[in-house]
Amino acid sequence: MELREVSDRVEIQAALTRYATGVDSKNWGLWQTVFTEDADVDYTNSTPLRGTPTELAAWYEVNFAPVPWTMHYVTNVDITFDGAEDAAKVTAMFYNPCLLPGQDATSYFGGYYHHDFVRTPQGWRSKHLVEEMVWWVNHPVRGTSSTAPTVFTAAAR
């Protein structure tokens, strides 16, 4: 592995850490630094949310305010450079325990983040994210467990 590829992999993994840290600390400005300005962020596998980072950050600011805590773990990061030095397909597993409003017990969910990263003058940024929810325990709407859950029902736009 060449030094540049090692550096690129470290930078992409740092972006995934910023994603989790931004969500868990409710720092939507930090969260937005993971993405290109015009990125397509698609959570429709689990919610009705899809939009640009700016649109979703505004939604999160309001709708995540009552969420007491979340704790994302992003693991098993698979990075494939897309035939060009300036593009990469990234799949990473996530595990997220959290306490949701109105719940007496911790909820747990997990799945995959599928990103298309590109090299920009500001570094590696995601231009497209698809969240693939695989499982959920203690779902606030559906009971104890579910696949492809609906977390929030408000539209993003």
Image: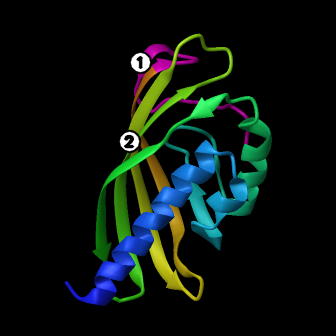
Q: Is residue 1 above or below residue 126?
A: below
Give, as a three-letter code, the residue at label 2.
Gly
Residue 90: in sight, yes or no?
yes
Residue placed at 74% from the left, 61% from the top? 54
Judging from the image, what secondary structure is the residue with disc 2 in? strand
Residue pointed to by mark 1: 145
Residue pointed to by mark 2: 111
Residue placed at 38% from the left, 79% from the top? 8
Determine which quarter of the picture holds residue 32.
bottom right
Q: CA distance from mark 1 to mark 2?
A: 14 Å
Q: Main secondary structure of the magenta part?
A: loop
Q: Is residue 102 above or below residue 66?
A: above
- Name the one closer to the observer, 17 or 87: 17
Residue placed at 42% from the left, 22% from the top? 146
Quarter in which the N terminus is drawn: bottom left
CA neighbours of label 1 inside 10 A, class few (<14), some (14 to 19), many (20+)? some
On the image, the x and y values in percent for residue 47 come to 58, 38
The magenta span reads: 138-156
Q: Is residue 106 above or below residue 49?
A: above
- Name the one closer to the observer, 3 or 123: 3
On the image, the x and y values in percent for residue 36 come to 61, 73
Q: Is residue 47 above or below residue 139?
A: below
Q: Is residue 144 left or right of residue 150?
A: left
Determine which quarter of the picture holds residue 68.
top right
Colour setting: rainbow
Give, as a three-letter code, the residue at label 1.
Ser
Residue 145 in magenta stretch:
yes
Residue 132 in magenta stretch:
no
Q: Is residue 56 left or right of residue 44?
A: right
CA neighbours of label 2 inside 10 A, class few (<14), some (14 to 19), many (20+)? some
- Name the one closer to the observer, 46 or 24: 24
Q: Is residue 47 left or right of residue 6?
A: right
